[in-house]
Image: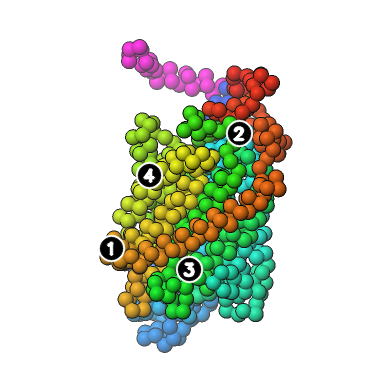
Amino acid sequence: MRRSEHKREKLSLAAKFSRLKTRMGDPEWRRFAATIAVGKFLGLALLLAIVIVVPALISASPQLVSGTPAYAQAPVDNMPGMAPAGNVLTGGAAPAAATTAPSATMVMVSDLSDTAKNPLINPINTLWTLLGAFLVFGMQVGFTMLEAGFCRSRETVNVLVECVFDTCLCGVLYYAFGYAFMFGGGNGFIGWHDPNDPSKSWFFLQNITAMSLYGATGIPVLAHWLFQFAFADCASTICSGTMIGRTGFVGDILYSICVSGFIYPIIGHWAWGPDGFLYTMGGKGMFLEMLGMNFHDFAGSTVVHSIGGWIALAGGIVLGPRIGRRFKRDGGAPMLPHDLTIAVCGGLLLWFGWYGFNPGSTLSAMDIGGIARVAANTTLAACAAGLTAVFFMYIRTGKWDAAAITNGFLAGLVAITCPCYWVSPLGSLILGGIAGVIVLLAVDLLEYLRVDDPIGAWPVHGVCGVWGTLSLGLFASGEYAAAGSSNTGTPVVDAASNPALTGLLYGGGVKVLAAQCIGSATIVISTFAIAFAIFKVLDAVGILRISREGELEGMDLHEHGISAYPEYVVTALAAPAGAAVNVSRSRPIKKSVHVSGK
C-alpha cells in the first residue's frame, strides 16, 4: 500500500467546529471534554501555586537555600558568639545572632557524629533501618510474582498461598525463638539471651522494651527484629522455588518450620551473631586464630541466599522431578513458564527491593558514603549480569531470552550482596558480569543432573551466593573499613585501629579469600546436609510430595479447590511433555482459550 493512501484529508477550520458540535451532542464526549478541561485547569492552578508559593517560602526562609545553618541539632554550651545551649527542636533557646553563623556551622559539622550533641542520629538511623525493612518485605511481592510466572498455570494458586503462608509462619517463629537463636548472645553456635545481660532471655522477645537498643547500632531491637524478619522471610521463600509443582502443602508447612525456625537462624548465628564462631573467626583465642581474619558477609550472599538456595537443591533432589518432566539428555526440554510478564515484573520488583536489602544493611543513614557506594555497586552488578546473561544465551541459541536476562540480573544482585560495601564500582561490574554467565552454566548443570528447578532458585541463589561470597576475597579494593558501616558516619580507614579489607587482586594476599572459602563451605555443607536429612524424613513418612493423583489433577484444584484463572480453559498439557496424563480419558481440550466478553 502506497504511503499516500495513509494520508488523511485535512479539515478546514469550519469543518472542525462542525465536527466538535456534532461530538458535543454525545453525552460520552461531553464527559470526556469535561474531564480534559478539569485536568488542564488543575494543572494550571498547581503551576500558578508553585510560581507564587515557592519564591515566597524562599524569601521567608533563606537558610533553606543558603549555607546558613538551620540549627536542627542542639548547639554546644558557651559556644563563642552564641547564646547558652538550646535546641529549636525541643523548644530551647535559639542561636543568638546571624553574624555568628560561620563559627556555629564549623562546630556543628564537627559534632554531627556525636550522639550526645546530635540527638537526631539514632532516630534517623532507625527510620533508615525501618525503610530498609519495608523494602525487603516488599520483595515478597516480587518472589511471589516470579514464582507464579515461571511455574505452570495449574500450580499458581499453590504458589500464592504458599508464599503468603510462609511469610506469616516466619513472622511468628522469628518472634518466638528465631531472632533469639540468630542475634542473641550465647555461644559460637546458637544464641538465646540479651548479649549485654546473659540473665535475660530473648525468646518471645522477652525483656525487650520499645527503647532497648541493639548493640552499638543505636537502633531499637524491635526495628532490628523487623529488618531481620524480612531477611528470614526471603530465605524461606527461596527454598520453595525449586520445589514448586509437587510439594504437598502439609509437607511445605513442616519444612518451612524447620527452615524459618531453626536452620536459617541457627546457621545464620554462626556468621552474624554477636559471638558466632565465623563472625569471631581469626580473633585471639577464637576459631582458627592463626588465620587472623574473620568471615565477612555484608548483606547475605551466604547467610540468606546460599542457605535458601542449598536448601532448595536438597528439596529438589529428594522430591524428584515433576511428573512428565523430561530433561535435555533424555530428549526433552524444560516446562515452559505460563506467564513471563508476571515473572519479569516480579524480578524487577526484587531488584527494587534490593535497595533496602543492601544499602539498608548499613543500619546507618549517617554513613552517607557507604550507602551511596552500596546502592551504586548493587545497580552496576545487576546491570552487568543481566547483559552478560542475555548475550551469552543469544550466542548459544540465537534468541534474546527473557528468562535468561531476568535470572541474570537476579544473579548479579545475589553476588553483590556480600561484597557490596568493600568493592569498587569496577569490581561490581566485573563480578556481576561473571555471575550472569555462571547462573546459566548452573542451569545447564541441573539439567544434566536431572534436577527439576522450575524457577532456577539454586543457580541464582545457591551458586551465585557462593560466587559473590568468594568474590570479596578477590575484589575487596582496600579502600573501605573491614569492620563495615558505622552508626555515626562514614568510617575512616586507619591501618592500626580500623584497617581496610583488601582482596587478592588488590595486593591483599589470600587471607580474605581463605576466610571466605572457609565460611562459605562451612555454611553450605552444613545447610545442605541438615536440609537433606529433614527432607528425607518427611519423604519417608509420605508427607513431602503430593500424591500422583493430586499432581495429575493439578495442585491448584487438588490442594486449594480453585484455579488461578477460572474464566479460562486451563489444560493439563501446559508445556512440552507438560503433565503425563491419559489424554484419551481426559476431557476434550478446547482449542481456543479466549473468553469473549460479549
Residue holding disc 1: 506
Instruction: Work out whether mark 4 precedes mark 2 in sequence or the reverse, and give the earlier one.
Output: 2
Q: CA distance from mark 1 to mark 4?
A: 23 Å
Front position among marks 2 and 1: 2
Front position among marks 3 and 1: 3
As helix, strand or loop, the secondary structure at mark 1 comes to helix
Residue holding disc 3: 278
As helix, strand or loop, the secondary structure at mark 4 comes to helix
Q: CA distance from mark 3 to mark 4?
A: 29 Å
Which residue is at a point 50% across and 75% down the rendered structure image? Answer: 216
From the top left corner, tell me how far across and down residue 137 is, in percent: 56, 54
Question: Of helix, strand and loop, which mostly describes the magenta segment?
Answer: helix
Mark 1 Cα within 10 Å, few/some/many (few <14, many 20+)? Answer: some
Q: Magenta span has 155? A: no
Residue 588 shows in this picture? yes
Amino acid on which disc 1 is placed: Tyr
Q: CA distance from mark 2 to mark 1?
A: 50 Å
Residue holding disc 2: 323
Instruction: Work out whether mark 3 precedes mark 1 in sequence or the reverse, and give the earlier one.
Output: 3
As helix, strand or loop, the secondary structure at mark 3 comes to loop
Amino acid on which disc 2 is placed: Ile
Residue holding disc 4: 437
Out of 5 and 422, give the one closest to the viewer.
Answer: 422
Which residue is at a point 50% across and 34% down the rendered structure image? Answer: 327
Amino acid on which disc 4 is placed: Val
Q: Magenta span has 10? A: yes
